[in-house]
């Protein structure tokens, strides 16, 4: 394929990592507006789409990448006109990421680039394994809206790789749970982890910045990059490394509020 189009932010990141701009028809407006400067800079060099069927018809791609849940109308049209469409599944493990990168690279004719990305992922994961904390660090992914990723999520996989225990995985259902502030305090994590892409001020952020949480978790609040923790990307290994570094910085800081794993 010489004119490839992406219809989701996750496939935007994969496509931009694997092909030169000359072979990319467009990526979504989400990539163009990304708070990740590297992704936004790459997206600025290629066309833009809004996931509309008109975009697909106008750009006439010879391959379209889409996620399982993105732009259903456009995907339906592509199937009706028998246009080449590759639907990329969600990832919940590094094995899933390996399969996704391998399959997408094959479809793009970019196997060498895909192999290089996976090799770098393996190097990073080996470094993460060597640096795991002696005692697991209990973590809650907290955004203030009540949703906490639990078992069977990529966040849980990333956190486990980094040497953490996801408190929501021990109290919630298969994929996610719901915490209010009282439940969060009862779960008593060592660290609160926030997605780095913070929303505009709203009730959600007011809850996340509750004064009690600010006091109890002073010095124990960290951030993680959201895109590679929500999408199955080779960069997900780097997200695990960043999360691990931030967790270790908290628990080894002489000014932390209490020993991790201890009583409040």
Image: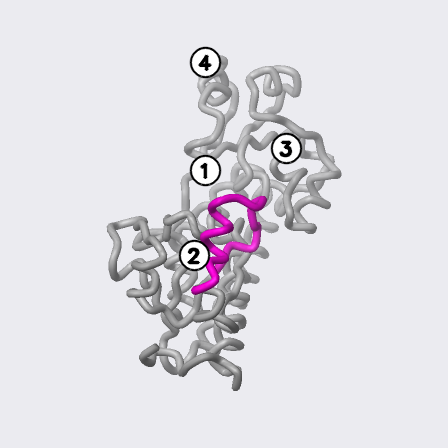
User: What secondary structure is found at the residue carrying circle 2?
Assistant: loop
The secondary element bearing badge 3 is classed as helix
Q: Which residue is mark 4?
A: 80
Tell me which corner region of the image, top left, top right, bottom left or bottom right, holds residue 259. bottom left
- Give the percent coordinates (x, y) of residue 163: 40, 72
Seen in the picture, residue 234 relative to 56 is either above or below; the reply is below
The answer to whether the residues at label 3 and label 2 have Cβ atoms under 8 Å apart is: no
Whether 260 is drawn above or below 184: the answer is below
Give me the residue at 51% from left, 54% from top.
195
The label nearer to you, 3 versus 2, is: 2
Secondary element at image label 1: strand
Q: Which mark's residue is nearer the viewer, 4 or 2?
A: 2
- Does label 3 or label 2 sit earlier along the sequence? 3
Horizontal and vertical percent for residue 15? 60, 41
Q: Residue at position x 30%, y 65% from top?
A: 187
Q: CA distance from mark 4 to mark 1?
A: 19 Å
Q: Give the extent of the magenta segment.
A: 194-212
Relative height, residue 63 to residue 120 (above, below): above
Number of other residues with Cα within 10 Å of mark 2, as a class: few under 14, some 14 to 19, many 20 or more: many
- Residue on which the image places disc 3: 29
Mark 1 = which residue? 88
**Who is closer to the viewer here, 226 or 234?**
226
* Residue 142: mark in rendering: 2
The residue under the point 26% across, 61% down is 170
- For residue 138, side relative to residue 174 (left or right): right
Helix, strand, or loop for circle 4?
helix
């Amino acid at each position: 394929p010489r004119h490839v189009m992406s219809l989701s932010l996750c496939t935007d990141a994969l496509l931009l990592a694997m092909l030169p701009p000359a072979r990319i028809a467009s990526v979504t407006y989400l990539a163009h507006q990304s708070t990740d400067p590297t992704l936004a800079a790459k997206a600025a060099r290629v066309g833009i789409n809004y996931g509309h069927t008109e975009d697909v018809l106008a750009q006439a791609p010879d391959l379209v990448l889409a996620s399982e849940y993105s732009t259903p109308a456009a995907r339906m049209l592509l199937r009706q006109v028998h246009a080449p469409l590759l639907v990329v599944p969600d990832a919940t493990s590094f094995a899933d990421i390996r399969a996704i990168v391998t399959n997408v690279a094959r479809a793009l004719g970019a196997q060498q680039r895909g192999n290089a990305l996976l090799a770098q992922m393996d190097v990073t994961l080996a470094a993460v394994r060597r640096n795991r904390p002696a005692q697991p660090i209990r973590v809650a992914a907290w955004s203030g809206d009540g949703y906490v990723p639990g078992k069977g999520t990529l966040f849980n996989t990333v956190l486990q790789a980094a040497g953490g225990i996801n408190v929501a995985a021990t109290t919630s259902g298969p994929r996610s749970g719901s915490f209010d502030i009282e439940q969060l305090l009862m779960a008593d994590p060592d660290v609160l982890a926030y997605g780095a892409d913070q929303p505009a001020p709203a009730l959600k952020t007011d809850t996340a910045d509750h004064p009690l949480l600010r006091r109890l978790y002073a010095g124990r609040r960290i951030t993680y990059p959201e895109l590679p923790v929500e999408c199955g990307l080779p960069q997900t290994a780097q997200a695990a490394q960043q999360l691990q570094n931030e967790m270790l910085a908290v628990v080894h800081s002489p000014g932390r509020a209490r020993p991790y794993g201890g009583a409040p």
